[in-house]
Amino acid sequence: MSTPNNTLGAMLAGIVVSSILYGTTQLQVFSYFIKHSGRDRLSLKSFVASLIVLDAVNMFLLAHTQYHDSVTNFGNGLADRSAPWSFMACVMTGIVINCSIQHFFAHKIYQLSKGALALPLAISTLSLGASGLGMTYGVKLIQNPWFADPGPQPRFAIISLALQVACDTLITGGMVYYLVRSKTGASTTNVLLNRLIFYSLNCGALNLVLAILSLAGLTKYPHTMIYAPFFVVQIRLYFCSLVVILNSRDIVHSKFEAPGLPVIAFRDPFELNKSSNGGSDKATMSSDDGTTESQTMVYGGIQIQRTIDIVRMD
């Protein structure tokens, strides 16, 4: 049964937490463009900038939805209310944000897996499926009273959220799996990879938990807005997590380049030459007099640099 507590109150709680995360994200974005974006390509900077605009629009639409329900419709019964256009637009912009970031991480997994297509394609399929059903849900919200008669739209939303849970599970599991596979016997490289795994697991797990809570809330209480706080907070958290990861790259990379660690300069850092007799990995290092010499290296040292270059997203 719909009550002000599980509808307007639930939405207000989501907006409060979402606003806090929005402010945190803006601080992270400011830090990214001032300190951490110098070596990034224009395409990555443009991607982040477009997400800033979408995030701001989504936050405005969320606030308008709350104003419509709490002020414009003050005193009106819940049963006769229709969803405002702003909530439909809020759902759709949130879906675009989530889908964009999911495909971004699918591309990173593709790079970490050295070109394996199965997992990135699965992530893309689930993400597009969740997006399509979610937008269908947003459109159908306008066709029925919001709380009294949910009609068929919860089915679209439930399936969409289920696909979202599966997609987030694959992203988190894929990032951790391929980072673990990059581990070597060298303690220094393993410490750095453990840090990368920690970042990936924490960011991915939080998004996954919120997606599960959204799914559980809508499945159990389809006539209420109990699911909404988790959904709107997840939108903020998705973007915030991405920017935090972007800003953390320099910390990880600086530890790899710490004094005392050997640094090999490659003309092509992704090109490795195999020796004909032992199968060891070879690297060409320039000496002070301009000559070059071939030195045998442990593959793990090169692999960790390649892995960090990918996670750096340069």
Image (tube, rainbow, N blue to C red):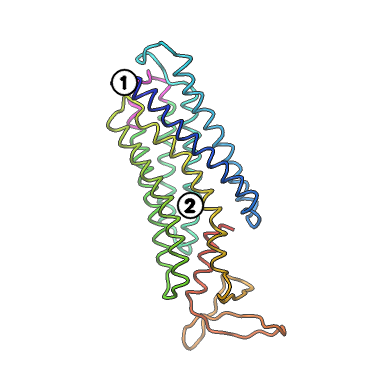
Mark 1: secondary structure: loop
Q: At label 1, which amino acid type do we have? A: Ser
Q: Residues within 10 Å of mark 2 (few under 14, many from 20)?
A: many
Residue in the foreground of this view, choosing between 91 and 212: 212
- Residue type at tag 2: Phe
The residue pinned by badge 2 equals: 105
Residue pushed farthest bottom? 277
Quarter placement of the N terminus: top left
At 36% from the left and 50% from the top, the residue drawn is: 169
Q: Nearer the viewer, mark 2 or mark 1?
A: 1
Determine whether 181 is above or below 49 in the image: below
Q: Which sits earlier in the primary sequence, circle 2 or circle 1?
A: 1
User: How far apart are the two marked residues, 2 and 1, measured between alpha carbons?
Assistant: 38 Å
Image height of 77 relative to 227, above or below: above
In the displayed structure, 18 sits above or below 1; it is below
Number of marks present in the image shown? 2
What residue did someone put label 1 on? 2
Residue, x 72% and y 85% (percent of image)? 289
Residue 142 part of the magenta-drawn span: yes
The percent coordinates of residue 82 (x first, y second) are 41, 18
Query: Does dot 2 land on a helix, a strand or a loop?
Result: helix
Residue 7 placement (x, y as % from top left): 36, 23
Q: Residues within 10 Å of mark 1 (few under 14, many from 20)?
A: some
Q: Which residues are magenta?
A: 140-156
